[in-house]
Amino acid sequence: MILGSHLSIAKGYKKAGEIAVDMGANTFQFFTRNPRGGKAKALDMEDIQALRDIMEEHHFGPLLAHAPYTLNLASGKEDVRTFGKNMLRDDLDRMEQLPAYLYNFHPGSHVKDGVAVGVERIVTALNEVMNGDETTTILLETMAGKGSEVGGNFGELKSILSEVAYPEKFGICMDTCHVYDAGYDIRGNLQQVLDEFDSVLGLEKLRAIHLNDSKFGLGSHKDRHAGVGEGKLGLDFLLEILGHEPLRDVPFFLETPYDDEGHKREIALLKERME
Ligand code: FE
Ligand code: FE
Ligand code: ZN
């Protein structure tokens, strides 16, 4: 089982690794820079080596980097897309120096131009930014379908993956809160949803899972995360997906509305119940 939570790298990568170990985690997710955008800090290679050592000593699974929320490649505004493309290129360059090879981003919002136009803009931007030499796997996150978000169903994600220049460099990060909010009844029938995922996208594309409970119900399109066992998905479901045999090599990341101490308690609870 590869399980961790989202945590801050504000105090450095080594510190983040230490916090993860203290939490009983064997991975973590981090923002590549301030989630609202802005300039990323220069990389301290000694600090990064210290994280590599921690990861090796504690047998970590893959880490997941998350792009800032301000990245919107589907925007109708050219300056927003340019800002996003520059950030993405910079992040992909930095990823080559980090002990992480999974990079997750929200496909974007088309505002009112429609999904097809949004998909087209995302594909064009990705193809402009990438050169095919990246060693990173870029993950599109499944979205709740709030507002004009692209990626609220598997077909929309597939339409992006089938048009990018380097499809082998892409995968999907499934957020349990988002897919449930989007109308996929993973709680009622996990296998059926995974079968649909497999037939549309291919299960081998599922490279990370955001393990969140959901404040609102099936198809609510709200995107409000709840703590483990404190939402409509419930503890039994979260344990079911965590223990689902075909997903045993996929890393799970908590993005529940708690701090490191809260995540530590949730990880302890999940691990205890998984035994
Ligand atoms: Fe996300
Ligand atoms: Fe998420
Ligand atoms: Zn969310």
Image: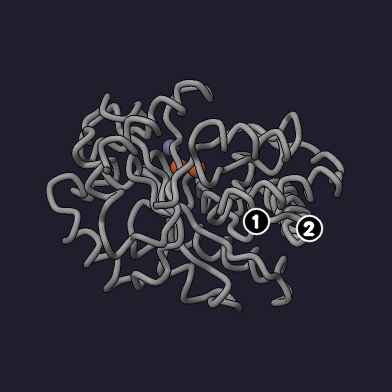
Give the side of residue 250 with respect to residue 13, left or right.
Answer: left
Would you say residue 78 is visible in this rendering? no
- Residue 78 position, x and y percent, is 70, 52
Give the side of residue 182 with respect to residue 263, left or right.
Answer: left
Residue at figure coordinates x 75%, y 62% from the top left:
96
Would you say residue 107 is visible in this rendering? yes
Disc number at residue 97?
2
Q: Residue 203 is drawn in which quadrant? A: bottom left
Disc number at residue 100?
1
> Image height check: is 249 above or below 275?
below
Q: Residue 30 is drawn in which quadrant? A: top right
- Residue 113 position, x and y percent, is 48, 52
As helix, strand or loop, the secondary structure at mark 2 comes to loop
Quadrant holding the C terminus: top left
As helix, strand or loop, the secondary structure at mark 1 comes to loop
The residues bearing labels 1 and 2 have C-alpha atoms spaced at a distance of: 8 Å
Q: In the image, what residue type sits under mark 2?
A: Gln
Which corner quadrant of the figure contains ligand 2? top left
Give the side of residue 88 with respect to residue 197, left or right.
Answer: right
Q: In the image, what residue type sits under mark 1?
A: Ala
Disc number at residue 197?
none
Viewer-side residue, 193 vs 106: 193
Give the class, few, some or many, for how many residues have Cα within 10 Å of label 2's Cα (few <14, many ≥20): some
